[in-house]
Amino acid sequence: MTGHIGIVGCSAEGAALCYKTICVEGSALLGAHAHPEVSMHTPSLSLYEACLERGDIEGVGDLMLASAEKLALIGADFLISPDNTIHQAFDYVAARSPLPWLHIAEVVVAEAKRRGFRRTAILGTQWLMASDVYPDKLKAQDIEWMLPDAAERVEIDRIIMEELVASSFRPVSVRFFQDVIGRLKDQGCDAAILGCTEIPLITDDGNSVLPTLDSTRLLARAALARAAEGAAVSG
């Protein structure tokens, strides 16, 4: 029997892509139309935004823990959050959580290490790009990183928070991400971390001049692998 995945949602598009990836790709591990049991809890995105705006990381963590408690009560075995930004509260949450978690940046950086990348671009919300969520994990693996410039970070954040989370996918925004990634490639980056779970909806290996590290799908696949371990043990 497979493990029961609990998804702590934040923004709808990212959570939906993660959930869909688990369900669609589960068949490769478990057989046609099969996937692990999955449950998700998502408070209002506005609650997370309010905490982030005032720098209340413990408040972010308390929202995550409230979801964790609900998911534990309905039988989840472990938890993931397909939202990079709120991982700023991960240490606070992990110490208090009723269930174990996978860390999205650890999953992404492990893939960067496996593929031999040496200098990655980090793209995400302003909150994420100003945080240590990725730098701490990259540093531990001796991988360098770069950020877009200040003006680019403002526009990336605007596109994410005004467009992508609201299911608006504009060609002009796709081109903007392409231009930013192209400039970072010229500065020596060899991969781009899509460090917001909505960015993969408009940017991927097909339209990026750098290989992309899709945080949403990488986390979903790591959760699938962990859940499938339960099937291997019980089998």
Image (spheres, rainbow, N blue to C red):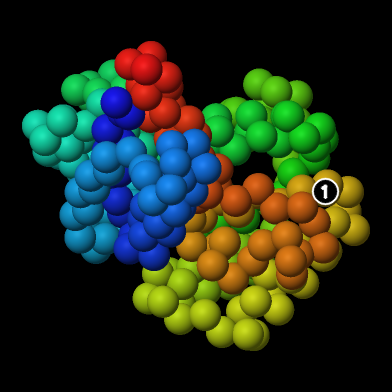
Q: Is residue 187 visible?
A: yes
Residue ID at (48%, 30%): 225
Q: Quadrant of residue 171?
A: bottom right
Q: Nearer the viewer, residue 75 or 112?
A: 75
Q: Is residue 91 above or below residue 11?
A: above
Residue 219 x/y as whole percent: 49, 41
Q: Residue furthest left?
A: 73
Residue 24 x/y as whole percent: 44, 53
Dot 1 falls on a residue whose secondary structure is loop
Identify the image quadrant of the C terminus: top left
The residue under label 1 is which amino acid type?
A: Cys
Residue ID at (29%, 26%): 1
Q: Nearer the viewer, residue 202 or 153?
A: 202
Q: Which residue is mark 1?
A: 189
Residue ID at (15%, 30%): 75
Residue ID at (48%, 68%): 160
- How many numbered badges does the structure rendering display? 1
Q: Is residue 156 left or right of residue 186?
A: left
Residue 47 x/y as whole percent: 21, 57
Graded by Cα atoms within 10 Å as few (under 14), some (14 to 19) or many (20 or more), the crowding at tag 1 reads many
Q: Is residue 208 above or below residue 81?
A: below
Q: Is residue 222 left or right of residue 191?
A: left
Q: Is residue 210 left or right of residue 193?
A: right
Q: Is residue 54 visible?
A: no
Residue 56 x/y as whole percent: 29, 44
Q: Is residue 140 above or below residue 213?
A: above
Q: Is residue 227 above or below residue 25?
A: above
